[in-house]
Image (cartoon, grey):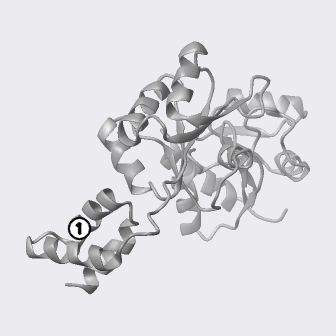
Amino acid sequence: MEAQFYIAATPIGNLGDISIRTLEILKKVDYIACEDTRKTKILLDKYLINTKLIDCHKFNEKERSGKIISIIKEGKTVAFVSDAGTPLISDPGSVLIKELKKENIKITALPGACAVITFLSLISRDSEEFAFIGFIPRNKQQQFDILDKYKYTNCVFYDSPNRFMNTLQNISDLYGSNKKIAVARELTKVFEEVKEGSVEEIINYYEKNPLKGEIVAMVFAQKENQDIDEVMIIDKIKILHKENFSPKDISRIISKLYGVNKNKIYKMSLETE
């Protein structure tokens, strides 16, 4: 065995999307810690794997960390899986890994399926840069805040089918109905679907085709205003300085008014104080 503890990615839908190495490790380890023993057993039964299971989810992760550390200190090996995809990517595991590292336990990751990367491989983008924010907040103002923070970056998030129509409307309220987005649901499954278009087009489509299944979405980055007059911007910064606005507030105001990157304005603001 290469390590004492393995982080193992599992399929996000199609059970065939698992690596040979992961199957070998899941067979060889002494225990598999998993988010839901029932779901993990479906995968293990398909590949005739009889390794013992330990439930380890977000509600008992701290408690289970102690048990897993004790098992490893007995000389045994453990693999960790979530219900689907890669652990720690909007899934449990962060607390467990932190505790294992405190004990200097050797950890390795077995790469594999991840809904974010699978989704991005289907979407043509002008830039490789993206921000993944996990599950988007439910609150409208919190959504506004986080989407505005990443408006110059392709912003990728998960959402529930029960809330996604509200999220779409909030995106429309923030950016307008022509804002370009991409949406995927049921990736790798029989009813996989990927849609790109304006937020208005996506809303109209899902009003006629009710949403089901796991959702990954992306709000396309807003292009910066490349023709902005820097002399004019500096003048605006000076005016706001005189009104006692902080560099942070100045960057937010000017970015909103003129479509310039907030970080760039913040730096200019510091330089003109």
Quadrant of the rendered structure where residue 234 is?
A: bottom left
Q: Left of 244 or right of it: where is 154?
A: right
**Residue 68: percent from left, percent from top:** 62, 52
Q: Left of 243 or right of it: where is 126?
A: right
Quadrant in which the C terminus appears: bottom left
Residue 46 position (above or below residue 147): above
Quadrant in which the N terminus appears: bottom right
Residue 57 can be seen in this image? no
Residue 83 position (above or below residue 270): above
Residue 18 can be seen in this image? yes
- For label 1, the residue is 250
Q: Nearer the viewer, residue 169 or 75?
A: 169
Q: Nearer the viewer, residue 178 or 8?
A: 178
Q: Residue at x 66, y 36 (%)?
A: 83
Q: Residue at x 30, y 80 (%)?
A: 231
Q: Secondary structure at mark 1?
A: helix
Residue located farthest toward the left when viewing the structure as drawn:
243
- Number of disc labels: 1
**Residue 248: percent from left, percent from top:** 25, 68
Q: Left of 39 or right of it: where is 160?
A: left
Residue 47 position (above or below residue 221): above
Tell me the kind of residue under disc 1: Ile
**Residue 152: percent from left, percent from top:** 47, 59
Q: Nearer the viewer, residue 265 or 78?
A: 265
Residue 109 position (above or below residue 211): below
Q: Nearer the viewer, residue 91 or 119?
A: 119
Q: Characterize the local packing of mark 1: few (<14), some (14-19) or many (20 or more) Cα atoms within 10 angstroms.
A: many
**Residue 19: percent from left, percent from top:** 87, 48
